[in-house]
Image (tube, rainbow, N blue to C red):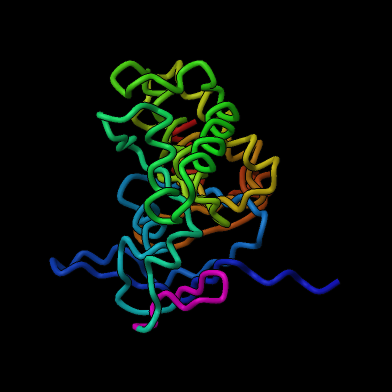
Amino acid sequence: MTNPKPIIKARHVDKTYPNGCHALKQVSLDVIPGEVVVIIGPSGSGKSTFLRTLNQLETISSGSIVMDGVNLTDKKTNINHVRKDVGMVFQQFNLFPHKTALGNVMMSPIKVLKERQDEAEQHARELLTRVGLADRMDNYPSRLSGGQQQRVAIARALAMRPKIMLFDEPTSALDPEMVGEVLDVMKGLANDGMTMVVVTHEMNFAKEVADRVVFMEEGELILEETPERFFSSRHPRLQRFLGQVL
């Protein structure tokens, strides 16, 4: 069998901010369709910056990123068109406070994909049921817990029918008792074959769900391995980090 073609192909990605901060240093990574890649590393390691380059929320100084055959660094590329296929879930939920959970999930398909109201509503109801919020559809964000709001945010991203989901530390703003409910939704997506790139500090999620785990430090991609090989690695920089978080 031939190796599947990567849906994400990052090559020698470099990012230097105007203040001189060298955030990414020659980062190269492939992601195969249906794969779950988890990126871990200390704060300030560049992992969230790298994730944000994958839908050009952060532009890069040099290198290339090809997403589903489209070169994101080509000036002719319509980034907004590419972003339709890339869902993103942030640390903060960023829900519209004046709209219900259902309204939040319906909004983008109607405005961006031009879906009919009834079609968007049916899909939104299915997604909210999928993330365990069938009984919370008519609630406004202020009436939802942090975990529930993050699950609405995941449903909202899925409503755009993306090919790829990016998660930027989706549980870091949650109280500990709410983390599990969000991770369970993400595990379900992984089991359904969604291509996912996840920045997280949840090591058990990386062990259980990832196809590959990536370690970044000081803007560099230091190591990428299967979970089993990754967590048994004796790489000194990885061992130092794991000693601090485990």
98 lies above or below 236: above
30 lies above or below 187: below
186 lies above or below 16: above
Q: Nearer the viewer, residue 142 or 12?
A: 142
Residue 150 in percent (x, y) is at 41, 31
Q: Nearer the viewer, residue 146 or 223?
A: 146
Q: Nearer the viewer, residue 83 or 213?
A: 83
Q: Nearer the viewer, residue 78 or 91?
A: 78
Residue 189 in percent (x, y) is at 62, 40
Residue 68 is a magenta residue: yes
Identify the residue at image location x=45%, y=67%.
Answer: 82
Quadrant of the rendered image containing residue 7: bottom right
Residue 111 in percent (x, y) is at 37, 52
Identify the residue at image location x=25%, y=29%.
Answer: 98
Give the residue furthest to the left: 19
Identify the residue at image location x=28%, y=20%.
Answer: 142
Please give the range of residues in magenta: 65-75
Residue 218 is a magenta residue: no
205 lies above or below 160: above
Residue 83 in percent (x, y) is at 43, 61
**Numbered disc total:** 0
Q: Which quadrant: the N terminus?
A: bottom right
